[in-house]
Image (cartoon, helix red, strand yellow):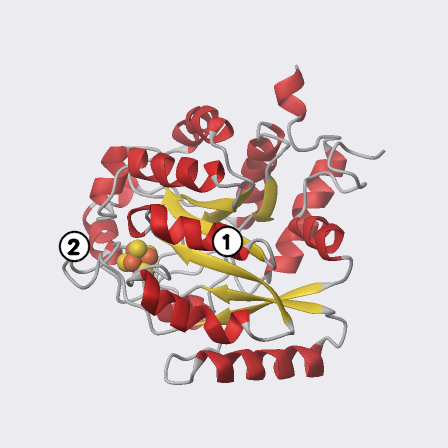
Amino acid sequence: MIYPWGDERRFNSYKRFLSHKFGTRVQKLTIDAGFTCPNRDGSVGTGGCTYCLNDAFNPSYCQPAKSVAQQLAEGVEFHVNRYRRAGAYLAYFQAFSNTYAPLEILKEIYAPALNNPAICGLIVGTRPDCIDESKLDFFASLQRRLFVSIEYGVESCDDRTLRRINRGHDFAAAVRAIQMTAERGIHCAAHFIYGLPGETPDTWFRDLHSINELPINGIKFHQLQLIKGTPMIQDFAQHPADFYFFDQPSYIDFIVKITERLNPAFVIERFAGEVPPRFLYQNTWGTVRYDVVLQNIEKKMVELDTWQGKALNH
Ligand code: SF4
């Protein structure tokens, strides 16, 4: 069966989206351009989001001591040696808040990626409160020659949760940023975490109604992983009953149910997070890699004969 997004996979996959858009296999190169974050430097908050340790989320080739040009060159070399199949590359500005600087500085930071002929697009991860009209106008102008995606950390639709994890913005700020991005026709993705304190599967199924209404193109889901050395460890030690953790089989059952209730227009860019085990405070998933988790999700969809958005039609 061919699903509405145009292939036989049971969800609207990012891999299909990219290969359809670029006509070749596309590889992301993760860049750490040395940004910080207003939730760490005191302009919005200090201490950061309680779950955040950026070192846990960055690949080893990516270090801010190296220039953006050098990280891109090393990233291309790494992937050429390892995979050999990528026909084009996307520069993924991932670490911290990658629009947290005046526009003129941002232009200088992105320039090595914009001027590199191997790069066919930019993916820019940021906070909803680190964007404004002029930055979005700049990104919109870039779209004439390359793909641009802005990726917002939304994390939760519930303001109580956002306060508890010290996000420093509310859900309305995320909705505003997403709307401003969508109005300019810029590809926009949103990131959510399942397992934040005080939330349960009932919260997440309820919040899907709000998520399905967002004018986003892509979506990423992560299960909460407790990272050593983060303030969330203390919250967990004091209120363990407030945390809902999934083992891998129960997460797969859960995320399949979420997927069947998810807007089929959304490209699913990730179903789950993957952090090197040495960073984890507790490891309930063992050493299973994301590609195995993805295979298990797709197997479960076949077993249940379900697909993205199926439950919305009934
Ligand atoms: S906004 Fe991002 S980089 Fe800043 S503290 Fe939160 S998770 Fe970390």
Q: Name the residue located 25 percent from the left edge and 43 percent from the top edge.
A: 169
The image quadrant where one finds ligand 1 is: bottom left
The image's mark for residue 141 is: 1
Between marks 2 and 1, how big is the CA–CA gap? 32 Å
Residue that label 2 marks = 45
Residue 121 coordinates in the image, percent (x, y): 58, 61
Q: Is residue 51 visible?
A: no
Q: Nearer the viewer, residue 129 or 160?
A: 129
Crowdedness of circle 1 by 10 Å Cα count: few (<14), some, many (20+)? some
Which quadrant of the structure image shows residue 240?
top left
The image's mark for residue 104 is: none
Q: Name the residue located 15 percent from the left edge and 57 percent from the top edge.
A: 43
Circles 2 and 1: CB atoms closer than 8 Å: no
5 relative position to 74: left or right? right
Amino acid marked by disc 1: Ser
Assign a secondary structure to mark 2: loop
Q: Nearer the viewer, residue 239 or 302?
A: 302
20 relative position to 106: left or right? right
Q: Name the residue located 75 percent from the left edge and 32 percent from the top edge.
A: 4
Which quadrant of the structure image shows residue 102?
bottom left
Amino acid marked by disc 2: Gly
Closest to the camera, between mark 2 and mark 1, is 1
